[in-house]
Amino acid sequence: MSELDILSFGETMAMFVAEQSGDLARVGQFHKRIAGADSNVAIGLSRLGFKVGWLSRVGADSLGRFVVDSLQAEGLDCRFVATDPRHPTGFQLKSLEEHGDDPRVEYFRRGSAASQLSVADIAPELLRARHLHATGIPPALSTSARDLSHSLMSKMRAAGRSVSFDPNLRPSLWGSEKLMIHEINRLAVLAHWVLPGLSEGRLLTGYEDPADIAAFYLDQGVEAVAIKLGAHGAYYRTHLHEGFVEAVPVPQVVDTVGAGDGFAVGLISALLENHSVAEAVQRANWIGSRAVQSRGDMEGLPTRDELPAAAARTLASRPVTPETVQTL
């Protein structure tokens, strides 16, 4: 097997998206797609030309076959997706909202096949991938999936591979907020690049200022922190540099779901291509802006051919000043 550029893991669910707005109980027609923050990032990186391996589990059911077929159609290497005969594929219902409002989502994932992921699912050849992307969702699914996350991140970092981590907090999946904060931070400090949203960073660290949030992780061995600030753009900090990168204006926000995943795609892809952190955040902001202009979780993620035009439109990084911090 040729070496993978990127390894990612987690749960891909089937998603039924309403074709009419209003109460989901009264919607009669849905369109079937796939959903999952981890696989959104994997798909985005695959569209940019990276060879991406996907580690997961699906049920021995039609939804599981649909998920795998959809991921393979996006170019993901799914040879490490196991079929679980005892647990079903998770799915979700998603509302159709007007005017860019956040959609309502109902999850049906408790006891799913992906929640059964464990350290035993790690094939040795997966550890030869150049980069690992992880999020805080798999460790929220089960204790065994949490052990898998910790093992993969530890092994990849020890092997000299780069590791990125997006907290992607899902409080409803955790037993308590205290447990969530402890476990997410335990994983975050195993990564080289950490990508929280501002509200996530504040909850996880107890600090309000983006610079202090970043320092919390940098002081524990992380190399770079990029904090998503929504309409304000993004803040980044390394041991040597820091700055803000302006958001990319969009004519209309259609669907906010997946914007953070698009940000991760941009940042990871650019850093793996040896761009500076500031340049990586510029790409991240642009791909995030694409994501919010498309209905669906990953439909707006660009191909490699679309990136040159994006580079010409991105806005430059600006230094941190008291004024910029006070606007957050």
Image (tube, helix red, strand yellow):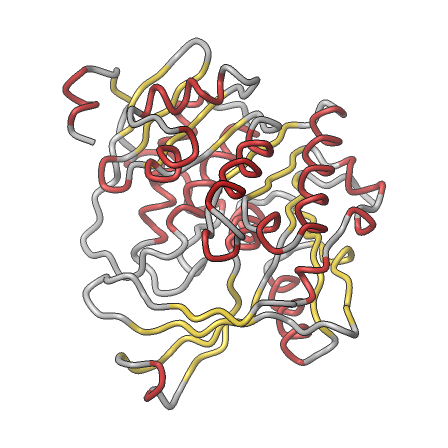
Position above or below: 193 against 92: above
Residue appearing at x 49%, y 71% in the figure: 92
Identify the residue at the far top of this view: 240
Residue 84 placement: quadrant: bottom right
Residue appearing at x 48%, y 24% in the figure: 275
- Percent across and percent down for residue 323 are 14, 20
Q: Is residue 233 left or right of residue 156?
A: left
Position above or below: 176 against 153: below
- Percent across and percent down for residue 160 are 72, 22
Q: Is residue 58 left or right of residue 32?
A: right
Residue appearing at x 31%, y 19% in the figure: 243
Position above or below: 246 against 138: above
- Percent across and percent down for residue 44 are 51, 49
Residue 109 placement: quadrant: bottom right
Total numbered labels: 0
Q: Return the residue nearer the eye: 183 or 194.
A: 183
Q: Is residue 46 left or right of residue 311?
A: right
Residue appearing at x 42%, y 17% in the figure: 215
- Percent across and percent down for residue 111 are 65, 67
Looking at the rendering, in which quadrant would you find the C terminus? top left
Position above or below: 85 against 48: below
